[in-house]
Image (tube, rainbow, N blue to C red):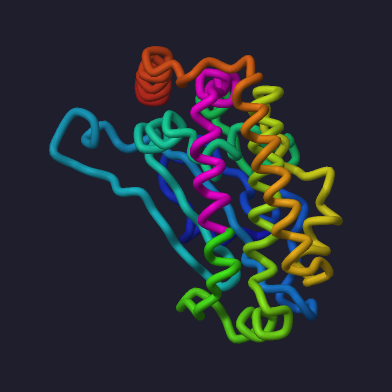
Amino acid sequence: MNIPQEVLPDNLILLGYRGSLAHGTYMPPSSPEGTDDRDIMGVFVAPLEHYMGFGRSDNKNKFVDEWDAVSYEIIKFVKLLLKCNPNVLNLLWLDESLYVFKHPVGQILIDKRNIFASKKSYYTFCGYAYSQLKKMTHHEYKGYMGQKRKKLVDKHGYDTRNASHLIRLLRMGIEFLNDGRLYVHRADAAELIAIKKGEWTLTQVQDEAESLLSLMEESYYKSPLPPEPDREKAERLVMEIITSYHFK
């Protein structure tokens, strides 16, 4: 895929697919039910002025054609990892084929990803899932919805795209609590696509979500993961990446 250069930041250290491209659930806009963008996420090291002078580099969100790109400066990225943000965590557990670019210091970030695996993920995955549940069942039309997606909401009586996100998030959260690993490219992709197509009723989605929420609570109590990410190791990791990028 030809990613437009204008959506990418300078000093990139890691770039990978996110969203439906990463999960194996991408449905192109040309398909009858397809409303997916092509999503990518990057991490960059800011210029030295950002860390040692007056300069500041902001995180970047850019949308060009069908590409939806988000890029984070390394300190901001690690702070989100420490909060167990599901979308950000995904970038460290991609299949190798889903990385577009890896600088050697970007590989360090992946190699030390277990720093960020903790039971705190229970709260963030549940929080994101409840957000999707609310959007799914209170489907007032938002500005981000295109006309095609609005028609699908009218057709099925609920937002099937949110429903698919809901089930995926809960399943991934359970797996992460059990194994300390995110399975980003989904073995259940065909089922998640079926949900996006509206092949499940709203009751089926709600029943599955209720069952998964119960399983996630069980997984939380049984999880071998530590209660919180290791902040000291995370801080040393950030310093190692910045110094390695600029001085080695």
Please state, as top left, top right, bottom left or bottom right, where the N terminus lies in the image: bottom right
Taking 166 as reference, is 118 above or below it? above
Where residue 36 appears, x then y in whole percent?
A: 66, 67
Residue 248, can we see it?
Answer: no
Q: Is residue 126 magenta?
A: yes
Residue 80, can we see it?
Answer: yes
Taking 6 as reference, is 24 above or below it? above
31 or 145: which is nearer to us?
145
Please state, as top left, top right, bottom left or bottom right, where the C terminus lies in the image: top left
Where residue 230 appears, x then y in whole percent?
A: 44, 16
Where residue 51 appears, x then y in whole percent?
A: 23, 30
Which residue corresponds to the image point at 71% horizontal and 23% vertical from the top-left?
A: 179
- Apparent side of residue 51 relative to residue 65 in the rendered image (left or right): left
Which residue corresponds to the image point at 66% horizontal and 60% vertical from the top-left?
A: 2
Q: Is residue 218 magenta?
A: no
Q: Quadrant of residue 184?
A: top right
- Apparent side of residue 39 relative to residue 157 in the rendered image (left or right): left
92 or 215: which is nearer to us?
215
Which residue corresponds to the image point at 73% horizontal and 79% vertical from the top-left?
A: 156
130 or 83: which is nearer to us?
130
The magenta segment is: 108-132
Where residue 139 appears, x then y in whole percent?
A: 55, 75
Taking 95 as reference, is 135 above or below it? below
Q: Quadrant of residue 74?
A: top left
Residue closest to the far left? 54
